[in-house]
Image: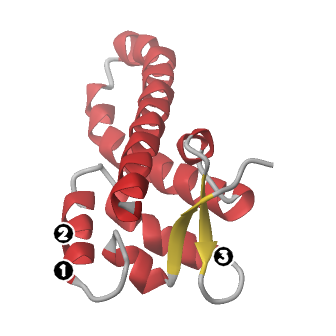
Amino acid sequence: MYMESIFIKRTLAFIIDALIITAIMWILSALVYPLIIVTGIFPIFNVWLILLAFIIIVYFSYMEKNKGATLGKDVMKLRVVSLEGELTYKKAVTRNLSKILWFPIIFDLIAGSLSTGNYLRYLDKVANTDVEVHAVE
């Protein structure tokens, strides 16, 4: 029951964070698109996937390392914790690698469910981190 509850909370948090990342990309597109039209540098669109991957890693890693949670996790009362020492940027980046461009997280979840222990995601196991329900203060 607990694993189902936290899975639902983590999924909702991820959806909230995906909407935030999407909003950031829409804003960047709205700012850059007029420049692209005027200059005709349409090949710059090839860079958007790289930019998206960079924004995803920076957003998730920065928020989890410095705030203990992304905005989505905070809304869902979840916190990322290190199971060994302090939550470092290395651990934060490692646990978030599967979120790059969203699709690989499916494999992370499958690998996590097949691995031993109570890990929901395999990269949480690799980074020695977990997500816990945070009591309201």
Q: Is residue 96 above or below residue 114?
A: above
Provide the secondary structure element on which disc 1 rests: helix
**Residue matched to label 2:** 110
Q: Is residue 49 above or below residue 120?
A: above
Q: Is residue 115 left or right of residue 61?
A: left
Identified by mark 1, the residue type is Leu
Image x and y of residue 89, in percent: 62, 72
Q: Around disc 3, counting alpha carbons within 10 Å, would you say few (fewer than 14), some (14 to 19), or many (20 or more)?
A: some
- Residue closest to the far front: 1
Identified by mark 3, the residue type is Leu
Task: Give the quadrant of the N terminus.
Answer: bottom left
- Give whichever of discs 1 and 3 has the lower sequence position: 3
**Residue matched to label 3:** 87
Image x and y of residue 30, in percent: 46, 15
Badges 1 and 2: C-beta atoms under 8 Å apart?
yes
Image x and y of residue 81, in percent: 62, 71
Separation of marks 1 and 3 at Cα, in angstroms: 25 Å
Provide the secondary structure element on which disc 2 rests: helix
Number of the label disc, if any, that sits on residue 95: none
Separation of marks 1 and 2 at Cα, in angstroms: 6 Å
Could you tell me which residue is drawn at 25 percent across and 66 percent down?
Answer: 109
- Residue closest to the far right: 137
Provide the secondary structure element on which disc 3 rests: loop
What coloring was used for the rendering? secondary structure
Identified by mark 2, the residue type is Ile
Q: Is residue 59 left or right of residue 87?
A: left
Could you tell me which residue is drawn at 70 percent across and 54 percent down?
Answer: 135
Instruction: Point out the frontmost of discs 3 and 2.
Output: 2
Number of the label disc, if any, that sits on residue 114: 1
Badges 3 and 2: C-beta atoms under 8 Å apart?
no
Quarter holding residue 108: bottom left
